[in-house]
Image (spheres, grey):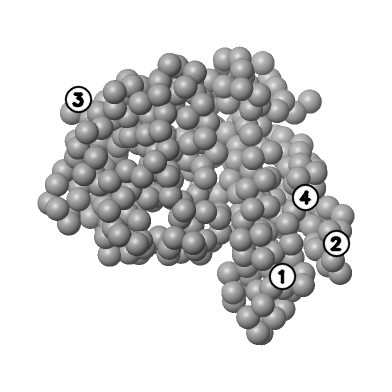
Amino acid sequence: MENFDWKNLPFGYIKTDYNIRCKYKDGKWGKLEVSSSEFIDIHIAATGLHYGQEAFEGLKAYMGKDGKVRLFRWEDNARRLISSADGVKMAAVPVELFKEALFKVIELNKKFIPPYESGASLYIRPLLYGSGPEVGVKPASEYTFLVFVTPVGPYFRGGVKPVNMLICRDVDRAAPMGTGIYKVGGNYAASMRAIIAAREGGYANTIFLDAKEKKYIDECGPANFFGIKDNTYVTPKSESILNSITNMSLIEIAKSLGMKTERRRIPVEELATFTEAGACGTAAVISPIAKIFDPGNNMVYDFCKSGSPGTLTMKLYDKLIAIQYGNEPDTFGWITILE
């Protein structure tokens, strides 16, 4: 688009032309509808508003140097939305319906896909919520699925920068056997007190510990945590953290680079043994961690004494980004090219 400052896009919301909507009613999904409105008409007793029947996804479309648009592991997002829907007892969106809505919304908003050289991408947000009215606590009989897009700039402007994190012991994001493994809004609402407190203290984000014993690393703000030592990529195994598609991908890339990988419980004290650490997710891909402060033990764990991100962290980051933009061959079968 003319006069659009692609290189200075924020990581935030910018209006695009169209979004896609679909209703579940009388036990079945209807047809996709195209809308140019940024607003939804919602019943005042909708379960999505009152009882947290809501789930969402986040993924990106990338413009390659060859002018082709690429999607990264969209089937995994579709499957995760099905899992989240089941977790809070909503009607699941079939993979084929998810795909149809996804491809259509990208095609309709193609002019908003940032050019390759900008380093930006088109962020895609599928959303599912209970739109049917209920006053008693029970699942709705009607649901709405919608997908909107917005162009976003790279999470780190001017290159990847290490950030500082704060360990949190006085707020729990999610309980074991709760909704932590699902991508539902309530988990993010539960994390906000801690995240805002960390940011007000000068930290980029907070690190949550397991809710039961407060001994093990859980989520890293809204992202997954990983640590690196002895050529090994280590990430938490927990029944209360989201299964990050970015993290799944980094594990496979680490193996392909000859690294060992471990998904297991990580005691807080083990932070002292890692040479590199980071948070990973769709937005930033990887946020390298410079320091972690643990106020409970008055400990500082330092991973970037030179001020630069770790070598292996950047190898993983560069490889994943190269695959997403089509600069390296996709040997994993993750990329879908939109013809």
Q: Secondary structure at mark 1?
A: loop
Query: Around disc 4, counting alpha carbons within 10 Å, would you say few (fewer than 14), some (14 to 19), or many (20 or more)?
Result: few
Contact check, label 4 and label 1, Cβ < 8 Å? no
Q: Secondary structure at mark 3?
A: loop
| Residue occupied by mark 3 | 306
Residue at left 64%, top 40%?
76
Q: Looking at the image, is mark 2 or mark 4 earlier in the sequence?
A: 2
| Residue occupied by mark 1 | 131
Residue at left 39%, top 49%?
219
| Residue occupied by mark 2 | 28
- Say whether residue 122 is visible: no
Pick the front one: 288 or 141: 141
Query: Disc 1 versus disc 3: distance between alpha carbons?
Result: 52 Å
Q: Position of residue 281 (x, y in %)?
A: 48, 40
Query: Disc 4 versus disc 3: distance between alpha carbons?
Result: 48 Å
Q: Is residue 27 left or right of residue 308?
A: right
Report the amino acid beneath label 3: Ser
| Residue occupied by mark 4 | 94
Report the amino acid beneath label 1: Ser
